[in-house]
Amino acid sequence: MGDQKRGHHSHEQRVQAEHADDFDEELEMELNDEGDDRMARLLGQVSFDGADPETQARHHYFKELFRLQSELVKLQDWVVDQKLKVVVLFEGRDAAGKGGVIKRITQRLNPRVCRVAALPAPNERERTQWYFQRYATHLPAAGEIVLFDRSWYNRAGVERVMGFCSENDVEEFFRSVPEFERMLVRSGIILIKYWFSITDDEQHFRFQMRIDDPIKQWKLSPMDLESRRRWEQYTKAKEEMLERTHIPEAPWWVVEAVDKKRSRLNCISHFLGQIAYREVERPPIVLPERVHNPDYVRQPLPKEWFVPNIY
């Protein structure tokens, strides 16, 4: 499963597209704060007929993103109503866009229902445990969705390539992980696995953008930089991982991720299609009248407690 090729665009065009994506992310947040009705009016009342292809594409992206996020809310309600247990694994090279998709999935969901598990490197005690133990503690209860931003597949990727485990450890992982995942599925967990695929050229470009942007430099760890040097080793590790852990009970799904916006929409749409959900009918919500007690007097707070209004 090779990484897909990127179209021929000048460096300047790619940089401009990256900045536009950053701007659109801020716009997503603003529109999200406006609420569904406001977003529908904003997107429905503005005509983009005759606009340039890039503007039309961005309009289509926003429209589809908000539609899919509305469906995610319905899926969330169905998971709670049916007491489902859902696990989604997001794997891929550094800067492949996993975090961006996770952010769009969780953006409008209840964090008590849909949560993200992004585990740090294991500590000394965890390194002596059964390998899957620290991941198992994050598995969902009934009515929950857990999104793993990297997962137990660290052993087949970064740990193997960086020499943090032995080849015997890797071989044991490949023997164990199919059985582990079959156990999860037999227990009633819906397990979905995504691999985000980008090209060598695209990862280089995204790393360089992070280096050039002080706001994004925190995203580049020494491990990320070293992974850049070991691209071919990661490729070999990825190919073996996908081949040996693609099982009928929990197959891998490859997301073509060079185009960030397309990959987000494609992944969310596919995720929604993996669970046969229906809209859960809710009783109408009636806001109760506020109780006013005539003997209540609101006490003023000391001025020094307040954050200064400098804006």
Image (cartoon, grey):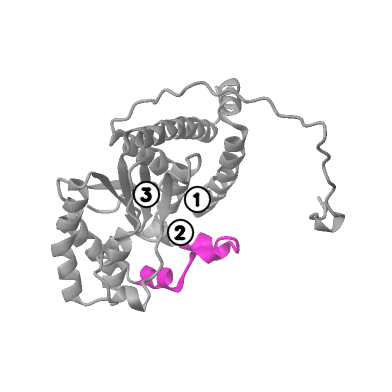
Residue 151, above or below 129: above
Q: Is residue 180 visible?
A: yes
Q: Are marks 1 and 2 in contact (CB under 8 Å)?
A: yes
Closer to the camera, 209 or 107? 107
Please give the name of the residue rendered at 39% of the width and 73% of the height, measured from the top-left corner: 226
Q: Left of 180 or right of it: where is 157?
A: right
Q: Residue 193: percent from the left, percent from the top?
A: 28, 49
Q: Residues within 10 Å of mark 3 (few under 14, many from 20)?
A: many
Q: CA distance from mark 3 to mark 2?
A: 30 Å
In the image, residue 209 lies in the stretch drawn in magenta:
yes
The three-letter code of the residue at mark 3 reads: Val
Q: Name the residue beneath numbered marker 1.
A: 14
Region rendered in magenta: 207-229
Q: Amino acid at mark 1?
A: Arg
Amino acid type, residue under disc 2 in the picture: Phe
Magenta stretch mostly in which secondary structure?
helix
